[in-house]
Image: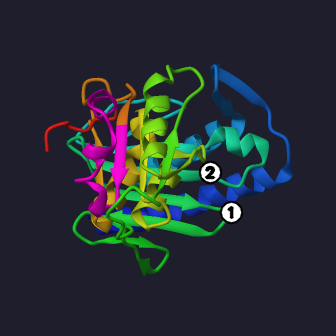
């Protein structure tokens, strides 16, 4: 049954992605602010509506949780970020994506992240590996933070203290850092080795639901605690190439490790 859902999710992400790309190329957007630094456009809302309509027709018993119209986790739940990287989208920056994840009993088992601008569809199904289009993907083989490229996310309306500490400690360890503005796509880039890691102190389930499956199936290390009782609550995420898992505790201090969901104990 999940094979059918995977094919459905890939087709849906590419279909709504084509619509979003057409809107992106058309120029300036009507933008509203949900909170400082947290933007929404009518394109975000329309993409989510189209996803909900398609899911409702194909899988009427499944629940949907989306960034724009909310929802809750049930036994079978689709988790949607209609446009991850909305600020990039509004500014004409070519780094944004569509993210569609599927959870069973609160655990991500299927993920599709579509990058319409580069015609890349990242996808994974539990136990089947991870892919970009037709090619299998794996994380980098890096084993030290010196020379590593690490992505990070930082929202304007949240306390930046732990993130600034993280960046200082990564810089001391001679890593290069990148803030690209779309967590789901950045996590996919960890899964395929374009980044060696990614950290964000407060990110939402719809940003990570699909990418967590991709990272796990690709062989990367990732941690995000899903709160079944409050699935819209933000939480820390970290993702690393497998060879960096041990050395991260020698690079970050205890407070920073804890801020990003990493157990300080080896």
Give the position of the C terminus as an image quadrant.
Answer: top left
| Residue 177 seen in the current view | yes
**Residue 57 in the figure: left or right of residue 86:** left
The residue stretch that appears in magenta: 237-259
What secondary structure is found at the residue carrying circle 1? loop
What secondary structure is found at the residue carrying circle 2? loop
Between residues 70 and 91, which one lies in front from this camera angle?
91
Residue 253 x, y percent position in the rendering: 30, 33
The way the protein has been coloured in the rendering is rainbow
Residue under pointer 2: 96
Q: Residue at x 52, y 67 (%)?
A: 121
- Magenta highlight on residue 256: yes
* Upstream in sequence: badge 2 or badge 1: 2
Residue under pointer 1: 117
Q: Residue at x 51, y 39 (%)?
A: 153
| Residue 203 seen in the current view | no
**Residues at discs 2 and 1 in contact (Cβ within 8 Å):** yes
Position of 97 relative to 35 (above/below) = below
- For this orientation, the residue located farthest to the right is 27
């Amino acid at each position: 049954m999940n094979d059918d859902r995977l094919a459905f999710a890939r087709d849906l992400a590419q279909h709504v992605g084509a619509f979003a790309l057409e809107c992106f190329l058309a120029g300036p957007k009507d933008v509203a602010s949900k909170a400082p630094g947290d933007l929404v456009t009518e394109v975000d809302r329309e993409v989510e509506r189209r996803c909900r309509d398609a899911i409702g027709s194909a899988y009427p018993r499944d629940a949907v949780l989306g960034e724009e119209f909310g929802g809750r986790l049930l036994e079978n739940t689709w988790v949607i970020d209609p446009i991850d990287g909305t600020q990039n989208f509004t500014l004409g920056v070519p780094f944004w994506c569509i993210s569609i994840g599927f959870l069973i009993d609160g655990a991500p088992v299927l993920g599709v992240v579509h990058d319409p601008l580069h015609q890349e569809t990242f996808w994974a199904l539990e136990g089947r590996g991870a892919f970009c289009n037709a090619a299998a993907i794996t994380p980098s083989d890096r084993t030290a933070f010196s020379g590593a490229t690490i992505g990070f996310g930082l929202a304007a309306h949240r306390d930046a203290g732990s993130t600034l500490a993280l960046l200082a400690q990564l810089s001391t360890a001679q890593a290069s850092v990148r803030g690209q503005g779309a967590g789901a796509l950045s996590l996919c880039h960890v899964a395929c080795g374009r980044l060696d890691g990614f950290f964000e102190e407060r990110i939402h389930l719809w940003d990570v639901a699909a990418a967590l499956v991709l990272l796990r199936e690709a062989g990367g290390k990732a941690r995000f605690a899903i709160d079944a009782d409050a699935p819209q609550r933000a939480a820390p995420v970290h993702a690393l190439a497998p060879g960096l898992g041990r050395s991260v505790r020698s690079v970050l201090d205890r407070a920073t490790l804890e801020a990003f969901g990493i157990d300080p104990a080896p």
